[in-house]
Image (cartoon, rainbow, N blue to C red):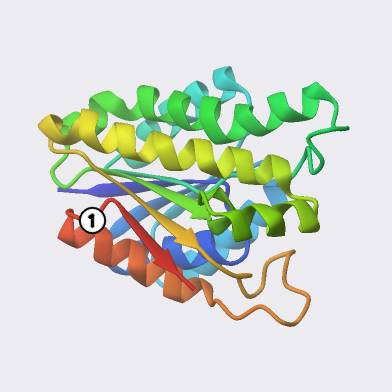
Amino acid sequence: MAKTILVCGYGPGISTAVAEKFGREGFSVALVARNAERLRAGVQALEAKGIRAAAFPADVADPAAVRALVGSVKAKLGPITVLHWNAYGGAAGDLLTAPLAELHTLFDVAVIGLLTALQASLADLREQKEAALLVTNGGLGLFDAKVDAQAVQWGAMGLAVANSAKHKIVGLLAEKLKPDGIYVGEVMVLGLVQGTPWDNGSATVPGSRVADKFWELYRARSEVSAIVA
């Protein structure tokens, strides 16, 4: 049976590696981001490796756009087997001074967008064998005093809050979707990912390491959350 992975929040680093990993394993790949040129380049790179891929420009913070893109993916590539949520925002760095609109934007991506995509894909996921929701997350979402101090120092308080929300959502959905045979898992990355806008030359985590962990979780279908450093 044909399999499709929907990669939301496509860019350099983790999502590129995940698209390549799952593509090599026989998945068609749907790439989603706002940057149409980046998507075209991503599709070309995947097709050069013999992977079937298509681009779907969309703002994942817009529920209507997310629902429309899921329909477009199904029409072009077939039913969705895996939903990979890699989108995030870095606004509201200081919770004491950030405009509330920035917090809305963070949660529109991290929570509303994710849940909208899942709801729109749910009928497919329930019918597909080995269906899954895979979520990229960051270590700033962990409940730890040292992590909190780091988030404050880096001016990434909003991102920390959004990551914590995603971490809880993953646990809840893993329990809720278990009877449907839909696996839910996340990889929490501790450290900077090579090749991303965050990489100032000192990043130590290759995207391929994260992608390999996602594939390991997906195949084993038991562990809900894993850490990569």
Pick the front one: 142 or 72:
142
State the residue in front, 190 or 42.
190
x and y, in percent, of residue 217 in the image: 26, 60
The residue depicted at 79 percent of the width and 22 percent of the height is 100
Q: In percent of the image, x 38 and y 29: which residue is there?
A: 118
Q: Secondary structure at mark 1?
A: loop
Q: Is residue 147 visible?
A: yes
Q: Is residue 102 above or below residue 211?
A: above
Extreme-front residue of the structure: 145
Q: Image quadrant of residue 184?
A: top left
Please determine whether, in this image, residue 67 is positioned above or below residue 91: above
Side of 192 where 130 appears, left or right: left
Residue 95, placed above or below residue 159: above
Give the percent coordinates (x, y) of residue 191. 59, 70
Is residue 54 left or right of 118 when viewed as pictured?
right
Across and down, in percent, residue 130 comes to: 16, 47
Instruction: Name the quadrant containing residue 190.
Output: bottom right
Query: What kind of residue is marked 1?
Result: Glu
- 146 or 217: which is nearer to us? 146
Mark 1 neighbour class, 10 Å CA radius: few under 14, some 14 to 19, many 20 or more: some
Q: Residue furthest right?
A: 97
Horizontal side of residue 45 vs 84, given as left or right: right
Residue 112 place in picture, x, y as percent: 53, 25
Residue 207 sits above or below residue 135 on the image: below
**Left-right relation of 214 to 13:** left
Residue holding disc 1:
223
